[in-house]
Image: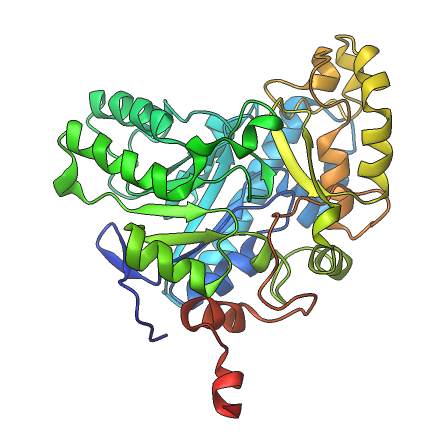
Amino acid sequence: MQHDFDSLIIRGKSLIPIVQGGMGVGVSASKLSSAVARENGVGTIASVDLRHLHEDLLAESKINPTEEKYCKLNHIALDREIQKAKADTQGKGMIAVNVMKAVKDHQALVRQACESGADAIVMGAGLPLDLPEMTEGYHKDVALLPILSESRGINIVLKRWMKKGILPDAIVVEHPAHAAGHLGAATVDGVNDAKFEFKRVIEETFEVFKKLGLESEKIPLILAGGMANFEKITTALKEWGASAVQIGTAFAVTQEGDAHLNFKKTLAGAPTEQVVEFMSVAGLPARGIRTKFLDNYIKREAKLQSNAKADPRRCTQGINCLSVCGLRDGLEKVGQFCIDIQLAAAWRGEVDKGLFFRGKDPLPFGDAIKSVRETIDYLLHGYTMEQRKIG
């Protein structure tokens, strides 16, 4: 697809400057990621709890469930999704796998993604300081993209990785005031801190590169959060010095998105005032739609938090998916619900029961459900091919 922007270069591969963000549970799997890759972009599979996409694995997980069994089945599901995505890319683009540092099994998921042939590992929801160690033996084949939100974190990660002789192939800079899902701030009030402003982070990061002698490495910066807008993309890439943007919600609602149609309609049709921030059970601020579940939870949050207590039985599925879980570990200042159950319900399209993560900003096509190709066409040109024909 022709466009007026410089290409995103990762491992010598020339790509369109569009990265599709990883979205779980099941929202970005093989269907969505391969569709983005076929347009020569970076498609991303979210590694968390992909068993929900495979009826045999989901059924098996309910028979004498154990944490070990849950992890094994998710590794099988991840391998299936990577293999299918790679087979459907027509040799174009890249298939990345997003692994949340906050997930207890994150190290094994990273290894599985590498073994299954992922082109890149993207890691956020915690500082990915040891990602080079997790990918030992695969550095020649797998690109590494940490997700960070401000220059201090970027500096810390770079210094640690440099001691291992490794540099990021690109850095995703995610703005907590705009992105969906888990956010890179310590508190809900902190998401609007000026230190997260994109232009400032880019300028400060270029200074970090200079101080560390990395200017010649030309490490791409990829902006994430509220960037599904042609004018914003133009400013970021033409004026600020970013190399690409990462888009989540706008791809989640496409025809190729892996979630239920009800999921897509809920995200696309949500008015701005219904998109709210709250503390996730993972101990991080998060952003989603105030649907029936979230509305009821927010109203009861203070009471639930006051009754928090450490009790492994509160993980009713027994899967212990998170390293730190507010519900299981009795952490009274963070979320008190099972995030896996609620996200899976959203993926199935259960509007009243699900937790629907969504970015804060308007979507390119309002409440319309368009294709990946149409979405990318707009992101790169400001209009779709169909609109060009009409014009």
**Residue furthest to the bottom:** 390
Q: Quadrant of residue 103?
A: top right
Quadrant placement of the N terminus: bottom left
Report whether 210 appears left or right of 13: left
- Number of labels in the image equals 0
Q: Position of residue 52 (x, y in %)?
A: 70, 44
Q: Position of residue 241 (x, y in %)?
A: 27, 51
Please report the residue visible at 21 percent of the width from the left and 54 percent of the height from the top: 12
Whether residue 152 is visible here, answered yes or no, is yes
Seen from the viewer's position, the closer of residues 271 and 50 is 271
Q: Is residue 174 above or below residue 367?
A: above
**Residue furthest to the front:** 194
Report whether 238 appears left or right of 79: left
Please report the residue visible at 65 percent of the width from the left and 39 percent of the height from the top: 287
Q: Position of residue 10 (x, y in %)?
A: 27, 51
Q: Is residue 372 above or below residue 215?
A: below
The colour mode here is rainbow
Report whether 391 appears left or right of 288: left
**Residue furthest to the top:** 310
Q: Position of residue 282 (x, y in %)?
A: 63, 24
Q: Is residue 92 above or below residue 123?
A: below
Whether residue 117 is visible here, answered yes or no, is no
Q: Quadrant of residue 191?
A: top right
